[in-house]
Amino acid sequence: MTKELRVKFWGVRGSYPTPGAGTIHFGGNTASVEVRAGERTIILDAGTGIIPLGRELARNKRAGEILLLLSHLHHDHTQGFPFFVPAYLPSAKLHIFGPDGTHESLKNVLERNQSSETFPVGLRDMASAKEIQSLRESQIVVWDERGVWVAESAAGPGLNRAEGLSEDAVVIRIHKSYAHPGGVYVYRITWRGKSVVYATDTEGYVGTDRKLVQFARDADLLIHDAQYSEEHYRGQLAGFPSTQGFGHSTVTMASEVAAAAEAERLVLFHHDPAYDDAMVAEMERTAQGLFAESFAAYEGMEFVLQVENKKATASAASHERAVQYAQNG
Ligand SMILES: [Zn+2]
Ligand SMILES: [Zn+2]
């Protein structure tokens, strides 16, 4: 059995898809990230990046049981779902979890996204088995030998031991951020001692978002919104009004959270649709000046985190070497 936690980026763009010559390197698909904990597939958000991911899962016969976690229900995080191939396969079983909308349940919003007025195939007409469940911040999602299930988080961070979960259990915690219109869920996925935190669509606070810093503490990989350059955010970029209060961060905000949380690595995510490859590359350099292990997400980028082997305790140094950053992978 594979003992790797793999994180692969399929859609890294914010707001709307941006195909074209200027975005070839970083990519133009909206938010979708694949996390593989051994043989289990977890998908973060269903922007248009989930479309090529769905094709690959079907092609490689990995479209069995899939857990899809939605950060929130804005278009750029859901618009790929109607084209997600596994959703059409009778053999597939999808657990679709996320927050409710501000006025409607998660299920209603997804159904409305595929109403007959706007899309030819309704959610119910897609052949896969679907479990759609609204999550509360106080809950924890577990995927172990019993399958995917939701528990109350009363046991706190010690759940792994306290509840007698197996070593192989994937545990997902939720932090609700109010730093985005309508709110957004930040997820922390932990498996065999490795953690990935997904904090998209969130705006930084003066002196950093302390709750987020706490939640992301010691993460092996922190994926953080970094939509804007400092100049753009402040309204000093020619042709771009200030974006303060829009619910997205600057590179500096993302770097400050990564440093304060003592994360191993920072991935800049949710690139502004108006930015071309040169601008995103420039932001990556800025981030690296503030937090050395910073990477601007691009389509196809993959991190492989070697998980702890309990029998032969690996040294910190070999852990470090085991992490591969696949350039243009
Ligand atoms: Zn977004
Ligand atoms: Zn949003």
Image (cartoon, helix red, strand yellow):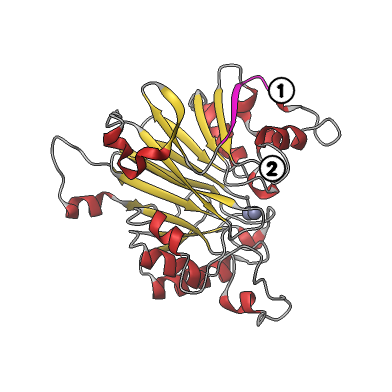
Can you identify the residue that label 2 sits on?
Answer: 79
Q: Nearer the viewer, residue 237 or 258?
A: 258
- Label 1 vs 2, first from the N-terminus: 2
The x, y position of residue 327, in whole percent, is: 41, 56
Which numbered disc, 1 or 2, marks the residue closer to the eye?
1
Marks 1/2: CA distance? 17 Å
Residue 302 visible in the picture: no
Q: Position of residue 53 (x, y in %)?
A: 55, 38
Q: Are marks 1 and 2 in contact (CB under 8 Å)?
A: no
Residue extent of the magenta highlight: 126-134
Q: In this view, does 206 lie to the left or right of 113?
A: left
In the rendered image, the vertical position of residue 101 relative to residue 199, given as above or below? above
Looking at the image, the residue that sits furthest to the front is 154
**Is residue 102 depicted above or below 245 in this figure?**
above
Q: Is mark 1 on a helix, strand or loop?
A: helix
- Residue 166 in the image: x percent, y percent? 28, 28
- Membership of 231 in magenta stretch: no
Quarter containing ligand 2?
bottom right
Between 249 and 184, which is closer to the camera in this rendering?
Answer: 184
| Residue 124: mark in rendering | 1
**As drawn, which residue projects farthest toward the left?**
312
Question: Would residue 219 be found to the left or right of residue 133 on screen?
Answer: left
286 and 93: which is toward the camera: 93
Q: Pinpoint residue 246: horizontal percent, then vertical percent.
A: 66, 65
Residue that appears at 14% across and 34% down: 311
Badge 2 crowding class, 10 Å Cα cut-off, few under 14, some 14 to 19, many 20 or more, is many
- Determine which quarter of the picture holds residue 167: top left
Q: Which amino acid does label 2 sit on?
A: Gln
* The residue positioned farthest toward the top in the image shown: 90
On the image, which quarter does residue 193 sit in? top left
Under mark 1, the amino acid is Arg
Q: What element carries label 2?
A: loop
